[in-house]
Amino acid sequence: MQSLMDERYPIYEQADIIVDSQQAAHDVIVRDVAKKLADYLTTTRNQH
């Protein structure tokens, strides 16, 4: 598991959007992803 984390974390750190994984219902995760994406798109549109 450690070698997998060592390989993937540097790539994950480059992400523009980060959604914390959690043990929650599917609709809660989907809502979190949708909100993070909407926030990101709003922010990037306002910067251009």
Image (tube, rainbow, N blue to C red):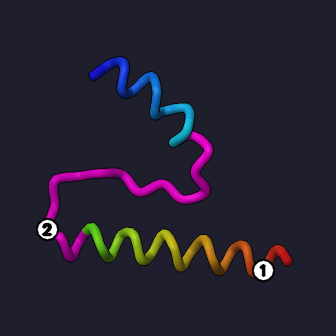
Q: Residues within 10 Å of mark 2 (few under 14, many from 20)?
A: few
Tell me: 31 left or right of 8.
Answer: left
From what the image shows, is residue 7 above or below residue 40? above
Q: Nearer the viewer, residue 48 or 12?
A: 12
Determine the residue positioned at 44% across, 75% down: 35
Tell me which segment is drawn in magenta: 13-28
Q: Which residue is mark 2?
A: 25
Q: Quadrant of the N terminus?
A: top left
Residue 4 higher or lower than 11, as above or below: above
Q: Which residue is mark 1?
A: 46
Magenta region's main secondary structure? loop
* Mark 2, secondary structure of its residue: loop
- The circle on residue 27 is none
Residue 29 in picture, x, y percent from top left: 27, 67
Along the line of sight, the residue nearer the viewer: 9 or 40: 9
| Left or right of 28 in this view: 33 | right
Amino acid type, callout 1: Asn
Report if residue 22 lies within the magenta region. yes
Q: Going 61% across and 56% down the picture, which residue do you hit?
A: 16
The location of residue 46, given as percent across then percent down, is 78, 80
Q: Quadrant of residue 44?
A: bottom right
Residue at 36%, 52% (x, y): give it: 20
Q: Residue at x 20, y 76 (%)?
A: 27
In percent of width and height, residue 48 lies at 85, 78
Q: CA distance from mark 2 to mark 1?
A: 32 Å
Q: Position of residue 32 (x, y in %)?
A: 36, 69
Q: Is residue 43 magenta?
A: no
